[in-house]
Image: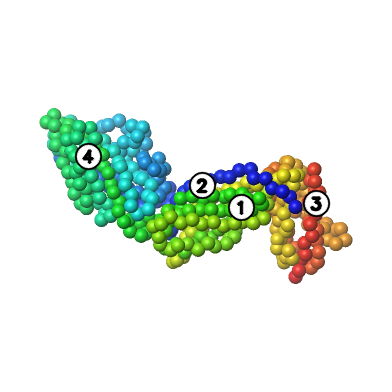
Amino acid sequence: MSKYLFLALIFFGFTFSASAQPGPNDPPQVDLVITLSTPLHSTTINFGLDVRATEGHDEEAGLREVNNLPPWTLGMEARFQRTNSSYTLADYRFGDGSNITAVHTIEFRKDQFDNGDVTISWNLPPYATGVLKDVINGSIVNVPMAGAGNTVIPDDGSGDPIVGKLLMTIIYTNIPDGVLPVELTAFDALVDGSDVVLAWETASETNNAGFEVQQLVGDSYQTLGFVSGFGTTNDAQSYSYRVTNVAAGVHSFRLKQIDFDGAFAYSDVATAELALDGMFAFAPAAPNPFNPQTQFSLTVGRQQHVRLAVYDMIGRQVALLHEGSLEAQEAHLFRFEANNLPSGRYFIQATGEFFSSAQAVVLSK
């Protein structure tokens, strides 16, 4: 039996929705707005929570993020300021659990010929409250934000508002179930000898029946097993699943999270790599006995020309599965179709430049 050596582990931390994995153009889970207006102009900017967003100022594409904003122009303008002093028109934060605090910095200015005050308006959901605070000279301190409301920034008498930058702290408390999706915060593929141990964690779950564990085999994913979920919970949960007797090479795994109502979502992919401690690994064909198809993997330690052929009991070649170069350290999947062959014992012969090996399979019709 070939020995395997762990080469690499790729770690993924991510989040997905219990009903549908958010795509780059899907709306955020909590999408709120704040409007700044003068007697002549107004502008609206978006903020809130999204499981795809980074912690802090969001850099993720698809959330109405607008970078490289043009210079300030005439009219009423407002932007969220990032920590690097650049600007964005939308500022979303990562949602972790049902109680979250998000801090946003708003910078604004208006046309100096647009005489009048600046009115800042909002309409928050019941589970979101906040405060506005002047971060420059303290002339505006702790203006409460709850439900629908507004505050007025007076004109300084020369066309400018008396302040031009505010800190907005929004506190999300007891976010209802279903607003934020199942939060998968970590997904590991750990190599243990010839096994791969998949481990993942959730920060919260809503209506979660469980997870199908899937492995990429050839060009499609196959289900390996199922791990039950915790239904609806705001507590962190940990899961694991062991995949045994994994052939040498690179292997990809994902989770299919399934709701009790049948809705599902796919996770990102976790990848583990097992390398050969030898010249080749010729994995046993499965199923065996078979009818009419069986499959196996072959991994070579060095790139080389390989011939894979199938012979019957008297040495006649009945199938040629492959003849050509195989990349090193990669599990190559092959299938033996025997629809037109009689029942009996056959031999799969693998011949490379640096090795030769055979295994027997039984066709039982």
Q: Return the residue at label 3.
A: 357
Q: Residues within 10 Å of mark 3 (few under 14, many from 20)?
A: few
Q: Earlier in the sequence, mark 3 or mark 4?
A: 4
What separation in Å lies between label 1 and label 4 (alpha carbons)?
52 Å
Q: Earlier in the sequence, mark 1 or mark 2?
A: 2
Position of residue 236 in the picture relative to residue 342 (left or right):
left
Work out whether residue 66 or residue 360 is closer to the camera in this orientation and state it: 360
Q: Return the residue at label 4.
A: 133
Work out whether residue 57 or residue 144 is closer to the camera in this orientation and state it: 144
Position of residue 316 in the picture relative to residue 236 (left or right):
right
Tell me the amino acid under the disc marked 3: Ser
Q: Would you say the residues marked 3 and 4 are in contact, meaning their CB atoms lie under 8 Å apart?
A: no
Q: Return the residue at label 1.
A: 196
Q: Would you say the residues marked 1 and 2 are in contact, meaning their CB atoms lie under 8 Å apart?
A: no
Secondary element under disc 1, as helix, strand or loop, is strand
Residue at position x 79%, y 60% from top?
A: 360
For discs 3 and 4, the disc positioned in front in the rendered view: 4
Q: Residues within 10 Å of mark 4 (few under 14, many from 20)?
A: some
Q: Position of residue 252 (x, y in %)?
A: 59, 50
Position above or below: 243 against 70: below
Q: Return the residue at label 2.
A: 12
Tell me the amino acid under the disc marked 2: Phe
Displayed quadrant of residue 208:
bottom left
Secondary element under disc 4, as helix, strand or loop, is strand
Residue 94 showing in the rendered view: yes
Q: Residues within 10 Å of mark 1 (few under 14, many from 20)?
A: many
Tell me the amino acid under the disc marked 1: Val
Q: Position of residue 332 (x, y in %)?
A: 68, 50
Secondary element under disc 3, as helix, strand or loop, is strand
What separation in Å lies between label 1 and label 2 (alpha carbons)?
15 Å
For discs 3 and 2, the disc positioned in front in the rendered view: 2
For discs 1 and 3, the disc positioned in front in the rendered view: 1
